[in-house]
Image (cartoon, rainbow, N blue to C red):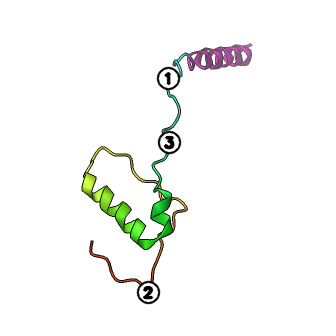
């Protein structure tokens, strides 16, 4: 008899706790769009440097981080070095 009461109490506790888990309202929303570099930054090394100088010039500490997943910085072995 005692194991049956223990199982019933355990089952009741599980059902009660499961019922308490919802009702949060779901106000999470969607994730913001990724801040990716423009296409001009990937086309040439000059465009990439212009993009980087634009980021540095804004000095915005509250800006979203830039998503560089899959971004390959262009290289130019024949061009002159650019001042940063």
Q: Measuring from the top left, give residue 74's x and y in whole percent.
A: 48, 72
| Quarter containing the N terminus | top right
| Residue appearing at x 52%, y 59% in the figure | 69
Q: Earlier in the sequence, mark 2 or mark 1?
A: 1
Question: Magenta part of the protein: which range?
Answer: 1-22
Q: Nearer the viewer, mark 2 or mark 3?
A: 2
Q: How far separated are the C-alphas under marks 1 and 3?
A: 17 Å
Q: Earlier in the sequence, mark 1 or mark 3?
A: 1
Residue at image mark 1:
27
Q: Residues within 10 Å of mark 1 (few under 14, many from 20)?
A: few
Residue at image mark 2:
78
Q: Name the residue nearer the viewer: 35 or 31.
A: 35
Q: Residues within 10 Å of mark 2 (few under 14, many from 20)?
A: few
The disc placed on residue 13 is none
The disc placed on residue 33 is 3
Q: Name the residue nearer the viewer: 38 or 69.
A: 38
| Residue appearing at x 45%, y 85% in the figure | 77
Q: Name the magenta segment's main secondary structure.
A: helix
Q: Measuring from the top left, give residue 24's x and y in whole percent.
A: 51, 19
């Amino acid at each position: 008899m005692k194991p049956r009461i223990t199982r019933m109490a355990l089952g009741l506790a599980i059902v009660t706790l499961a019922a308490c888990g919802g009702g949060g309202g779901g106000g999470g929303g969607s994730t913001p769009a990724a801040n990716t570099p423009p296409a001009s930054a990937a086309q040439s090394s000059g465009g990439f440097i212009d993009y980087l100088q634009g980021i540095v010039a804004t000095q915005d500490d509250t800006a979203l981080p830039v998503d560089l997943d899959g971004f390959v910085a262009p290289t130019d072995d024949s061009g002159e070095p650019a001042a940063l």
